[in-house]
Amino acid sequence: IGTVAYAVSRSSKLLEQQSSTDNEKNMVDTEETRLGTASTALPSPEVHDVMEMIDAAYSQCQPSGTTSSGLLISNLSSRHTISSSMGSAFSEGSAIAFLFDELCYAVRSGRLAEPIRKYLDQKFQEEFEDAFVGDFTVLKEGKTCTPTIDLSGTPDNDVSFAPADSDDLALVNGTSTNIIAPRGEIRFSIEGPHPEVYVKILSLLSSYDVIERELLPVQLCPMFRLVAALNDTRHGGCGLSELDAMLDCPMLLPHPESSKIQFKDMPSMQQWVITSSYFFATCWVRELINSFIYAGAVVPSNGSTQSSAPKSTLSHEFNATDVRKKIVARLKALVELEEELRFTCSRCFVFAAPGLDILPAPKELLDDAIPDDVEPELALGPAENALSSNGNKEVNAAAKKQASKRAKQKEKSKHKRIKAEAKHKELLCSRTMAALRPLDPQVCVALGFGELSILSNEENLSQQLSQVKCIQVGGPVTTLLLSLLENTLSNLLADNRVASFKARIGKIQNNDSSLEEESDNPYKVERSTDNPTSIFELSLASCDSSSRKCFDMLDLYLRCGVFASLFEHLAAITELRCGANRQANAEEESDLLRIARVILSCVRTLIGSTQLTRSRTGKLFLSSILSQLAEGDRNDHSFSKPPCSEKIKKMLSNLFDLVQEVLVGADTVDMDFVMDGIFCLD
């Protein structure tokens, strides 16, 4: 913290000096441009001083006394050491991860001098590539890699590609001599031109080197987050086109078969490697989506009829349409990875996510029990068996009674163990999923992507709803995004939303952590809107910092058509449940009601928010939200005139009718859905 604060304070002083020089020369420029021009005018001794201090902090954050452990696979002692301590060094990498996050705050504040930014970008891009990225090589004729990377559907699908690293190739081929490494596979390659690189996740977590196995994985997401912030033009970078290759590169992960039924029969070391691989892969995919989602949101700006991403997020040679498709592909991969992680982490008793201790197994799972294949009559003591063989009827009766008693105790103990095991698995899963890197609230804009739309843009809503057989509502990706939107709106529009510094150092898990991070950025200087002209800008200028962040997020949702997507889902659910062509069976009905409950929760949060109903700015947003939510109008998003009360009342009436039709249009035994609908109507 001291190092980053020093870098920011020195940069600020140097920029002030440069600003004074510019003023003397009658050079009028914006602060962002001054930041760029300072690169040639900053005194090199001060810049080098900051660079050396960052280098020193980076070096000091490395754990002391850490050396490679047990590089010889045949060494039994090193094998035992690894088995008894895997994961214990995760916490040793937290200091470096925190340094990356703190530097990211400084970059996002826009208060680092350009030479320092360039130094950080070059340094950590090179380190990231060296530590986490592997190259592919084209296999020569006659050589095979089983299995090679899946390039079905690509222009070069007749060419075989394989990892250039021999150890990684051995993992993929199943010929590795590493006893803790399961078989690997290059997974989640996006359809298109063959990728040039892949992310080395399995090879790191199956390494005998403790630095590679337990320190580097903890740095993966924070380091990339810093590099992405340095390249994001919103923060003074050259554009994310420098990094978009990472969005479509696959990962070296355990083979999918390893996360199925055979997982329980694997050695505990391999179980740990598989579970930790899925944990860090899930974090990695979430970080990729967080980094590219804003740049991929191609949205019309206020008052514009032309679709374009916010100019500050893009650079030339950056195709936002392709990015959206890749983000949707990554969302699908995320859903699959989370399912595999839930399966493995609930069955791996030796894994604990970074920052957590291993959860002790309940005593019921540790108690010795009579094997299931032993008959109750044979589960007697030696003396009892001897007496029963003498033909004494009284003794035999007592022995049978004792055997029956033991059988009942065994059955009771078995049920107790099953219940304890299920509870332990649920706790393991919940604490692991809570430790994942959170999705940014901006990811909700993917609901407005054409790739996830339930309706095509060529036909109007009524025409398509009449063909309900072609409509697919829900799905794992949509369900994930709707749940994220529900949590985001609840946190965003809460009356008493408080940010905590503890959230920055990982002590508090929060679904809305991105908003808290930005509001708790100690290096950021809030600036009021310069010369507000429109009603929208005038209204925002009168809001406090917390409200402006809330309205900025809602503005992004509106421009991406998120609330129009909610309307389309509600209308489609109504048609599928209540229309003339009703098709839903019991299972489909349950899925539809589950999605409807999430949407109804979002509606209740929006309509019940005092922030939207009791302020001038809030009513501006409420009018635009209702235009999408009650009428499905994606085009009418402008703040050119104050909202009309009569129009708001009419849209509220339309929304009431839509919710009422969803609720009473068909019979249901799901009382939770019924009560949610009643509360929403109320």
Image: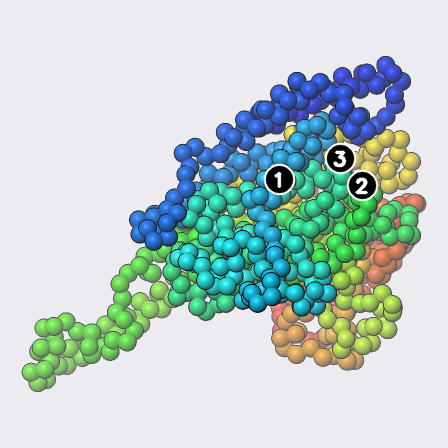
As rendered, which of 332 and 138 lies closer to the eye?
Answer: 138
Query: What's the residue at 63%, 71% (across, down)?
Result: 590
Where is residue 261 shown, x and y percent of the image? 45, 69
Q: Quadrant of residue 315?
A: top right
Q: Considering the image in quadrants, where does the C terminus appear?
A: bottom right
Q: How is the image coloured?
A: rainbow
Q: Kindly identify which residue carries mark 1.
A: 126
Q: Kindly identify which residue carries mark 2.
A: 312
Where is residue 528 shown, x and y percent of the image? 80, 30
Residue 580: mark in rendering: none
Task: Name the kind of residue labelled 2 in the image.
Answer: Ser
Distance (Cα) linking label 3 and label 1: 20 Å
Task: Name the kind of residue labelled 1 in the image.
Answer: Glu
Q: Is disc 2 placed on a helix, strand or loop?
A: helix
Query: What's the residue at 28%, 60% (across, down)?
Result: 367
Q: Is residue 13 left or right of residue 34?
A: left
User: Closer to the camera: disc 3 or disc 1?
Assistant: 1
As rendered, which of 484 and 47 lies closer to the eye?
Answer: 47
Mark 3 or mark 2: name the one nearer the start of the chain.
3
Q: Kindly identify which residue carries mark 3.
A: 236
User: Is 411 rendered above or below residue 288?
Assistant: below
Distance (Cα) linking label 3 and label 2: 9 Å
